[in-house]
Amino acid sequence: MSTDQPTRRRLERMDDLVSLCARRGFIFPSSEIYGGINGFWDYGPLGAELKQNLKALWWQRVVRQRPDVEGIDSAIIAHPRTWEASGHVEHFSDPMVDCKTCKRRFRADQIEDERCPEAPKKRAITDCDLTDPRNFNLMLQTQIGASSEAASTAYLRAETCQPIFNDFKRVREAARQKIPFGIAQIGKAFRNEINPRNFTFRSREFEQAELEFFVHPSEREKWFEHWQEERLAFHRELGFDDDHLRTRPHASDELAHYARAAVDVEYLFPFGWQEIEGIHDRGDWDLSRHSEYSGKDLGVTDPDTKEHYMPMVIETSVGIDRTVLALLCDAYSEEEVGEGDTRLVMHFPAGLAPLDVAVLPLSKKLAEPAHALEESLRRRFNVFYDEAGNIGRRYRRQDEAGTPFCVTIDFDTADDGKVTLRDRDSMSQDRVALEGVAAWLSERLEA
Amino acid sequence: MSTDQPTRRRLERMDDLVSLCARRGFIFPSSEIYGGINGFWDYGPLGAELKQNLKALWWQRVVRQRPDVEGIDSAIIAHPRTWEASGHVEHFSDPMVDCKTCKRRFRADQIEDERCPEAPKKRAITDCDLTDPRNFNLMLQTQIGASSEAASTAYLRAETCQPIFNDFKRVREAARQKIPFGIAQIGKAFRNEINPRNFTFRSREFEQAELEFFVHPSEREKWFEHWQEERLAFHRELGFDDDHLRTRPHASDELAHYARAAVDVEYLFPFGWQEIEGIHDRGDWDLSRHSEYSGKDLGVTDPDTKEHYMPMVIETSVGIDRTVLALLCDAYSEEEVGEGDTRLVMHFPAGLAPLDVAVLPLSKKLAEPAHALEESLRRRFNVFYDEAGNIGRRYRRQDEAGTPFCVTIDFDTADDGKVTLRDRDSMSQDRVALEGVAAWLSERLEA
């Protein structure tokens, strides 16, 4: 096997990734045995670990490492007034038209070049018998409580930031924080997207990691800059190619109703440049609205100048599922190795990879020392054990899972006390003493 | 200050805990500024870390440390057929009666000794003009999709285990697991409880950590025993007093429709013995029903005997919020220290406590070396920095937060290179070299 730079073919068709993800258990449709449910996805064993590692890194960088950020974990269902104050009940909708013949619904602003699904060769949708456009709210509703007359309507949160604004005063006081400081959380959000598409990119249930950073009005530009730099550094730490990562400021006519300025962090997916994170100057929109709707003053008083003011909010909002998808796309590689042989390998950054290390005895007869090593490594690492099949095929399976290192125990191990450590990316092999394996791995896995 | 065993008063009234939790930002009502929403709670900075530490420990013990368990992370919303197959659409309901006068709704089996809320002194509810009992399904419903005729009804999952059964075949094949093995996940579930009560104990949105362990029919008793022992050991690791922890087997008339045997792990809360975890022998109920409803055979073939059979399921289901509540109750202590002085201290086990260590410079003049220490510790620990107020008051604040250790930097530190490490429980103090602080903490925090 050569350690020369192999020819690398990057992901071109999403179908290749979708199929790998199902086969290896990264991500597959929710309720697959019932034919799936459009816009909902389940993370399998490898996907769940990858997503969890990403969330843990974000929490470490944004919350635990910063004295000026507090983490919370709020309920998905909040008081419905929350969503009136936020503007979602009024504004969070798409204009829709219904076809009077087939009863299908379409986004009014997306039918220009589309064909009628009933007769795609004969008709453009614009030629169908359509209703006038009506607004269709994207929030998922439910009924809670048990009054027999009118159960009360509640909403599944459409973004994780609104509960942060609800809790702003309580958290500021309990944590004794002063402006500038932030509140962050990771959690599920829901939107009834009309056309879920591009694998997990646009789905109806998704996970966000959001930070709302509260600043004095005179400092908003400074902090807007600060968080752009911080967040871009985070995405670089995820190992994304510079060619596949860019920031894009919003034009003034693109801004949401609450935003005074916005910059997207975009990744170049096989389906084009798309947002994986948004950095927004939300001004005092949210705190002012919640003050008005709740009757509670969410303003703060400067302890030195005694000025009473409404803090401005700089928001960083990363789509966890989208970033996992970018990690999967970025890691994907088909490579020629040896004569006419190819491998599919996922080049996840060490530390984010679902598995840290695989323990592979060369023969089942070596199971005992291999299990002993496996067990000792499990205390600190995410370990996979595999004793079935020839060693080349086992390496390939770990390449597909993106496992950075494999430890092979062979018949020399009993004599020289050494094992072979094989590197996923270079395929190079090191002989390392058994008792040094944990330290060897720590050095390479713990940044 | 004495290091003798202090007089300890345990939590007696839940109100004391509820008030501490709000004041210090462990847990408070969701949407508090809007008057709250019954049955929904937010975790503040300390509560979010405590809950996260508990979930991480469960994941480590149940998933990462075991070669025979795979973790997943499924969508909250599954195909609605899932809940028909599981029996929830038909059976997951309480019998309710409505008062024809005030329109309130009550659980038919809970009105025996209750008073009418409109005229509690005059009337028992049983004397009100009530409707006949009707079944009221506890699942939260929503509508998804965008057909103009009939949007489709979906349910927020009522338990995290059903998506595990949906994904059983996919995960088994992708992870190349053989019976016996398990699939686990942690996540939100929702039930429209009629009477949310006892702080977070019975709420409408809650988090579960569930393991479904699939076994051959001949081995179910063995594994049912195994998981009882494992799970009890887990709760002992959480530090619960033996006096406050017990198992209680269900009588045959208590069993749910799917269960053949069940044992509750119960904790003695101030409001009585209550379940924090259930261990269930679910038999082949779930896999058989999902096979029938989906038309997909979820049975397995024994690779040696070629026997084709439906695996039996041993389930362990822990309520994360309930266990956090038990941790809070168990940790709570009011103690006399010194002459007539008292402290409120949360004796969380090290490693589960929201904060690992507080860095406290004796004077603001020592902020520079204190910040340097703080920053170096943040890489590995959850650190709090506090330079305001007298040192006794700062220790008390950390006692209330349950922070196991405080590092005090004083004016001798510059000379002797040592700091004071103060132990939360014994209040004893050690002088430790600055460069040895991280190792001193690691030894005590990382089990």
Image (cartoon, coloured by chain):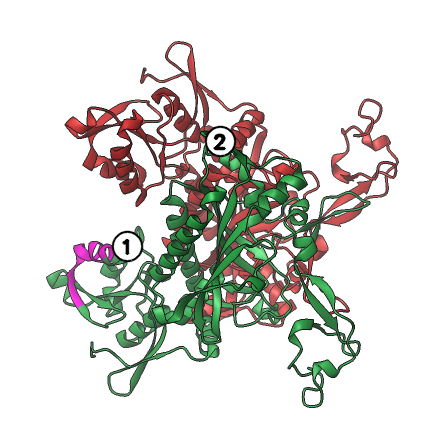
Chain colours: A green, B red
Quadrant assignment, res A421: bottom left
Q: Is mark 2 on a helix, strand or loop?
A: helix
Classed neighbour count for the residue bearing mark 1: other residues with Cα under 10 Å, few (<14), some (14–19), many (≥20) = few
Q: Picture coordinates of residue B161 (x, y %)? A: 55, 55
Asked if residue B229 can be seen in this view, the reply is no
Q: Mark 1 lies on which chain?
A: A
User: Which residue is at the far top?
Assistant: B339
- Mark 1 and mark 2 on one chain: no
Q: Can you identify the residue that label 1 sits on?
A: A447
Tell me residue B203's x, y (percent): 62, 41
SS assignment for the magenta stretch, majority: helix
Q: In which quarter of the image is the N terminus of chain B?
A: top left
In the drawing, does residue B408 fall left or right of residue B8? left
Instruction: Identify residue for label 2.
Output: B24
- In the rendered image, residue B14 lying in the magenta stretch gets the answer no
Q: Is residue A63 left or right of residue B322?
A: left
Outermost residue, bottom side: A121
Magenta-highlighted residues: A430-443
- Which of B323 and A138 lies nearest the eye of the viewer? A138
- The residue nearer to you, when weighing A47 against A137, is A137
Query: Identity of the amino acid at label 2?
Result: Arg
Q: Quadrant of the C terminus of chain B?
A: top left
